[in-house]
């Protein structure tokens, strides 16, 4: 079963705009993490939010977690062209060690 | 503290050749995982080691893939013989405990031509 299903699949915005991506998961988690993968490159960890947290900030990133709805959102403010990448989430911890990601949200920030 | 490292960062090989990918987990992390993302698709779990033992290799696509973790430190993933559909990015992750967060390496991009 997937522990990270991102929505939308693709998002195209202009530089300076905000980008919001959503993630849903199925089973209980201890934490939820967001990652970014630039084209052809590795997976970069962005932010981790624990199940007892509702919101977390890191620079231009804001993550929310709603465990009752089993969903999370990632907001990138004042986007830059360098933010262009695929964004993935996964819920982890507990008995679910076999992390499974969705197809990600492909974010394109146009200069 | 050093993070998870992977080598090489990029490998280009011909169909039928053999490639070995290496992953060095964070020191002290007994749990090591391999994942891969083929072009435009999901990142999928391949297998999980606890120390040198394979705990779960249910995600390994076929017997052309062989993962080892001799001594319980670094791990290798060998693809022999490589096929075109093996192209993608192979990620390694490690964790202190299977219930805790996994830390990912930068990945190895494999291109089979």
Image: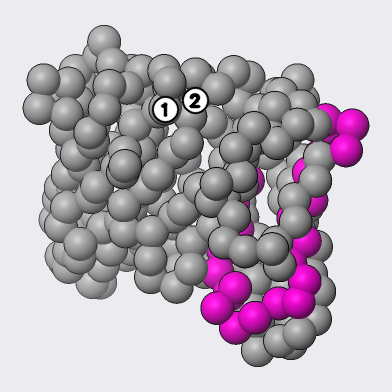
Chain of the residue displaying label 2? B
Q: Which residue appears farthest toward the right when viewing the image?
A: B71
Magenta includes B81?
yes
Residue B17 position, x and y percent, is 80, 81
* Above or below: residue B95 compared with residue A78: above
Q: Name the residue under label 1.
A: A96
Q: Mark 2 points at which residue?
A: B101
* Left or right side of B57 for A109: left
Residue at 31 percent of width and 52 percent of height: A102
User: In this view of the protein, which residue sits in the foreground, B11 or B79?
Assistant: B79
Residue B23 position, x and y percent, is 74, 46
Answer whether residue B102 is visible to the viewer in this image: yes
Residue at 69 percent of width and 63 percent of height: B63
Label 1 Cα crowd, 10 Å radius (few <14 / some 14-19 / many 20+) = some
Circle 1 SS class:
loop
Residue B60 position, x and y percent, is 59, 55
* Above or below: residue B21 compared with residue B12: above
- Closest to the camera, between mark 1 and mark 2, is 1
What's the magenta region?
A: B70-92
């Amino acid at each position: 079963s997937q522990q990270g299903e991102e929505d939308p699949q693709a998002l195209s915005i202009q530089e300076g705009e905000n980008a919001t991506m959503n993630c849903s998961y199925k089973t209980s988690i201890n934490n939820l993490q967001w990652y970014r993968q630039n084209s052809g490159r590795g997976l970069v960890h962005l932010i981790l939010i624990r199940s007892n947290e509702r919101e977390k900030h890191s620079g231009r990133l804001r993550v929310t977690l709603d465990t009752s709805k089993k969903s999370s959102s990632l907001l990138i403010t004042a986007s830059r062209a360098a933010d262009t990448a695929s964004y993935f989430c996964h819920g982890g911890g507990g008995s679910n060690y076999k992390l499974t990601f969705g197809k990600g949200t492909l974010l394109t920030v146009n200069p | 503290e050093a993070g998870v490292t992977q080598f090489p960062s990029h490998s280009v090989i011909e169909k039928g050749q053999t490639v070995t990918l290496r992953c060095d987990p964070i020191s002290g992390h007994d749990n090591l995982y391999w994942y891969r993302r083929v072009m435009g698709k999901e990142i999928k779990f391949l297998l999980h080691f606890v120390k040198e033992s394979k705990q779960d290799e249910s995600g390994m696509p076929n017997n052309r893939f062989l993962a080892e973790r001799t001594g319980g430190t670094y791990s290798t993933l060998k693809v022999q013989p490589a096929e075109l559909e093996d192209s993608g990015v192979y990620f390694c992750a490690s964790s202190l405990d299977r219930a805790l967060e996994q830390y990912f390496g930068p990945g190895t991009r494999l291109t089979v031509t």
